[in-house]
Image (cartoon, rainbow, N blue to C red):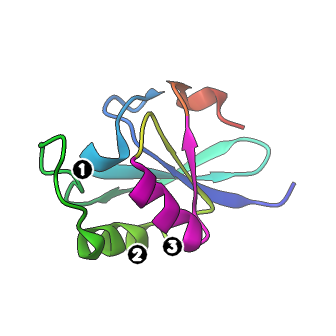
Amino acid sequence: MKKKRIALVSTDGIHVNEHFGKAERFQVYDVADSLRWVEDRSTEPLSVGQRDHPFDVHKLNRIAALLKDCTKVYVTQIGWKPAAHLKMLGIEPVIYKGTIADIK
């Protein structure tokens, strides 16, 4: 199987359990026959904690640059603007709630 790289948001290292906009770090894995942890990448959260916060494309571009080598990012939720922007850059947002070990 060809190796691909993914990112995910987890606060406990076991489950995908965080909204994309609240992420303070992304866990990066290589996926082939199994998952292999590569590194954690710290970031400033996209969200400022307000439900209707303005969309900050510059902040999103900094986050996207952290994920540029990833084909997918697994999150529990993501806004439509960040999702569309990531897709435009070739990073597929995946809405997922479950254990990291179950990602294939």
Residue identifier under label 3: 68
Residue 39 makes an appearance in the image: no
On the image, which quarter does residue 14 sit in? Answer: top left
Residue drawn at x 25%, y 62% as measured from the top left: 55
Picture coordinates of residue 36, whole percent (x, y) = 60, 47
Whether residue 53 is situated above or below residue 11 in the rendered picture: below
- Indicate whether residue 87 is drawn in magenta: yes
Give the amino acid at mark 1. Glu
Q: CA distance from mark 2 to mark 3?
A: 5 Å
Start-end of magenta stretch: 79-95
* Tag 2 near tag 1, CB within 8 Å: no
Horizontal and vertical percent position of residue 73: 52, 51
31 vs 94, left or right, is right
Say whether residue 16 is left or right of residue 36: left
N-terminal of the two: label 1 or label 3?
1
Q: Residue at x 40, y 33 (%)?
A: 13
Mark 2 lies on residue: 65
